[in-house]
Amino acid sequence: MAYFCYMVRCNDGSYYTGWTLDPERRTKQHNSGKGAKYTRLHQPVELVYVELQPDRGTAMRRERIIKSMTHAKKNEMAEAYQLEKETHA
C-alpha cells in the first residue's frame, strides 16, 4: 500500500499539509467541503506537492516536519515540485 504526504495551496495562499493513500481523491474531498476543517474555510485548494512514503508512520512524521516549515520553504517545495512535474509531462 502506498502512502503519500501532500500539500495543497488554499485560495488565500496558505498551505495545508496532510497524508493520504490517494492525493487526488483527498484534494477532491477538500474542495467538496468534506476534507479538513481548515480547508473548508479556505477553499478551493490546489494540489501542489506530493511525496511518496514507505508507510503510514513515515508519512505522518513527514507531515509534521513540513507543517513546521516556513511559508517561504513551502513555496520553494511547491515550485520545485511543479517544475519537476512539468519537465516529466
Image (spheres, rainbow, N blue to C red):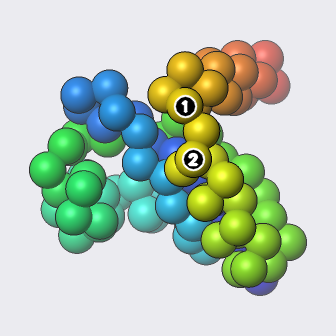
Q: Residue at x 19, y 43 (%)?
A: 42
Q: Residue 78 at x, y = what percent?
A: 60, 28
Rendered view: 79 above or below 70? above
Does residue 57 appear left or right of residue 79 in this picture? right
Does residue 50 appear left or right of residue 32 in this picture? right
Q: Secondary structure at mark 2?
A: loop
Identify residue type, mark 1: Thr
Does residue 24 appear left or right of residue 9 in this picture? right
Identify residue type, mark 2: Ser
Q: Residue 59 at x, y = what percent?
A: 70, 68
Rendered view: 6 above or below 55? above
Q: Residue 44 at x, y = what percent?
A: 23, 40
Q: Quadrant of residue 52?
A: bottom right
Identify the residue under disc 2: 68
Q: Quadrant of residue 60?
A: bottom right
Rendered view: 60 above or below 77? below
How far is disc 1 from disc 2 in space, using C-alphas? 7 Å
| Label 2 CA crowd tier, 10 Å (few <14, some 14–19, many 20+) | few
Q: Is the residue under label 2 in contact with that under label 1 (CB below 8 Å)? A: no
Q: Residue at x 51, y 61 (%)?
A: 18
Q: Residue at x 79, y 65 (%)?
A: 53
Identify the residue under disc 1: 70
